[in-house]
Amino acid sequence: MADWQDLKAELDLWAEQGKQASFWWRDDDAAQRSSALERLIALAEERDVPLAVAVIPKTAEAELSGRLREAPGVEILQHGLAHVNHAPGDEKKQEFGPHRNKKELLADIREGDRLLADFANRCAVFVPPWNRVDSKLLPVLPAFGIRGISTFGPRHEEAPVPGLERVNTHIDPVNWRGGRIFTGDDLALGQVLSHLEKRRQGLVDADEPTGLLSHHLVHDEEGWCFLARLLDLTCSHKAVKWLRASEAFGFDK
């Protein structure tokens, strides 16, 4: 059973070993202004934690662009095109999977980029819906101005192809198969601890920041409380640094 004291103890080990536990935060499925979005932004701004919002281009409303422009700590990522599933039958959902030809996929990426033209603080990162993308698509993404890719789980390589950086997320506190409720502290903290421990021990890429994945439109009250407590604990610990998406991907170098 993982608890909050376990997380503090793990971060203490990072500090004792002179290591910095880097984190970054990605929130998916933004399309319109809402009370949930306001709560998300407030959560980040009150703690001075940088936030990356993955926006669905096809359904993004102009009011969303204006609101996010007022939040300088928020960077914008491209979340597919329409967040529509093209996988057949019982296959796992994918918008950018191998079910369509490359020409169609690239046309959707280009259209998504065009639709997000009015958004400020853009970060050239592509976030495929459902965290799945056809690997054959990756080599051509840099030619379309995409410099980063983000899905879920520890990365196997920092740059899957030349010109494309990968930085994933590792903490998802939503139980998607169990009613979209909070997973509970044990499972959510277990994800945090697992990635931090493996980074510290060199079992996964130690340079990949631990990524928090949130979905502001889905979280129940327990989920929001978990996010707040995680941010509070990490922000108050000397071993932790929260990175902007552009920092996490190394675009600031």
Image (spheres, rainbow, N blue to C red):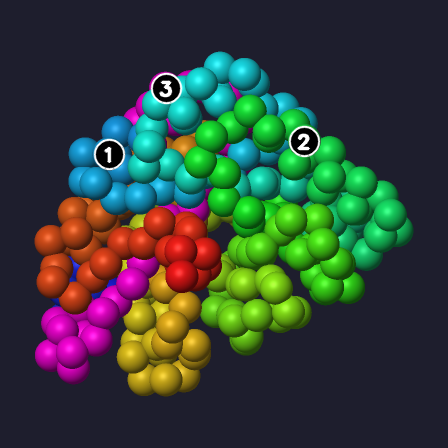
Quarter of the C terminus within the rendering: bottom left
Count how many numbered circles sit on residues in the image.
3
Mark 2 or 3 closer to N-term? Answer: 3
Outermost residue to the bottom: 202
Camera-nearest residue between 34 and 5: 34
Camera-nearest residue between 173 and 66: 66
Cα–Cα gap, marks 2 and 1: 28 Å
The residue singled out by tag 3 in the image is 35
Residue at the (59%, 40%) spot, across then down: 79
Magenta-colored span: 11-40
Residue at the (24%, 34%) spot, across then down: 45
- Crowd rating for badge 3 (residues with CA inside 10 Å; few <14, some 14–19, many 20+): few
The residue singled out by tag 2 in the image is 114
Of circles 2 and 3, the one toward us is 2
Q: Quadrant of residue 156?
A: bottom right
Instruction: Please state if 116 lies on the left or on the right of 169 as rendered.
Output: right
Circle 3: residue type: Ser
Cα–Cα gap, marks 2 and 3: 27 Å
| Marker disc for residue 45 | 1
Circle 2: residue type: Arg
Circle 1: residue type: Glu
In the rendered image, residue 58, in percent from the top left (x then y), is placed at 67, 27
What SS does tag 2 mark?
A: helix
In the rendered image, residue 199, in percent from the top left (x then y), is placed at 35, 76
Whether pointer 3 and pointer 1 mark residues with C-beta atoms closer than 8 Å, the reply is: no
Of circles 2 and 1, the one toward us is 2
Cα–Cα gap, marks 3 and 1: 15 Å
Residue at the (50%, 38%) spot, across then down: 122
Instruction: Please state if 50 lies on the left or on the right of 10 as rendered.
Output: right
What SS does tag 3 mark?
A: helix
